Image (cartoon, rainbow, N blue to C red):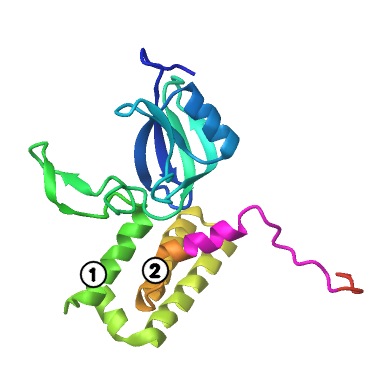
Amino acid sequence: MTFDGQGLIPAVIQDWLDGTVLMLGYMNQDALIKTLQTRSVHFWSRSRQKLWEKGETSGHFLRVKDLFVDCDRDTILVKAEPVGPTCHTGERACFFVRMTEEGHAGEDKTQDAAGGILERIYQAILARKAAPQPDSYVSKLLQGGPDRILKKVAEEAGEVIIAAKNQKRDEIIYETADLLFHTLLVLGYHDVTLGEVYRELGNRFGKSGLRPPPEGGSRE
């Protein structure tokens, strides 16, 4: 590991479920060791000149899931599970202001830095749900109700099956994208967030998908 002249190394904190960059902090050797030992993120406060655990006063801890170092060994990436909002402002993450074309910080808050492309699509679906547009495909499906949306999901699932059976890679990619998109419509219609789905997947991660046989029974 390469620490700077002050004995510090930057640590990028990332939500382990959806990849959102939550914050940037600095660790010294003691903070890094404490983080590894406790599996709770610790930093070195440059302003207070002291070791501190994220969440020690707010209760909004960062539970470590995994740690990585970059190619130059001078930056740490921590994948963590946040307990409550990470930013001291009460926002989920510290990055919620977009930079303007002139290189200045904008005035409005945005959640566009969070998650990835699935989150962006989901937010667009919610926007169409809140403000339907007459020429919008999404608006028409949402206004058609669950039966119309679910019919499209079934159709797209069938297209994925056909593409996979035909072993056509490009078609598998294309049809899977369609299936994911229409599944996001189902979530948006029912106000089920991607975060809820991610958490369910997170709860299953590392666990066997095989159910144990009933007592006295067998799988044979």
Tell me if residue 204 is in the magenta stretch: yes
Q: Is residue 153 above or below residue 41?
A: below
Tell me the residue that label 2 is attached to: 184
Closer to the observer: label 1 or label 2? Answer: 1
Q: Is residue 203 above or below residue 31?
A: below
Please give left or right for residue 218 compared with residue 87 in the image.
Answer: right
Residue 10: quarter of image: top left
Q: Position of residue 153 (x, y in %)?
A: 45, 75
- Callout 1 environment at 10 Å: few (<14), some (14 to 19), or many (20+)? some
Q: Is residue 24 visible?
A: yes
Give whichever of 162, 39 is nearer the camera. Answer: 39
Please give left or right for residue 179 compared with residue 124 in the image.
Answer: right
Residue type indicated by callout 1: Ala
Q: Is residue 166 visible?
A: no
Give whichever of 70, 7 is nearer the camera. Answer: 7
- Residue that lies at the very extreme toward the top in this rendered image: 5
- Callout 2 environment at 10 Å: few (<14), some (14 to 19), or many (20+)? many
Q: What kind of element bears circle 1?
A: helix
What span is colored magenta in the figure?
Answer: 197-214
Tell me if residue 200 is in the magenta stretch: yes
Q: Which mark is residue 127?
A: 1
Rounded to the nearest angstrom, the CA distance separating label 1 from label 2 is: 13 Å
| Residue drawn at (39%, 28%) of the image | 50
Residue type indicated by callout 2: Leu
Q: Which mark is residue 48?
A: none
Q: Position of residue 60 (x, y in %)?
A: 42, 50
**Which quadrant does the C terminus fall into?**
bottom right
Give whichever of 45, 75 is nearer the camera. Answer: 45
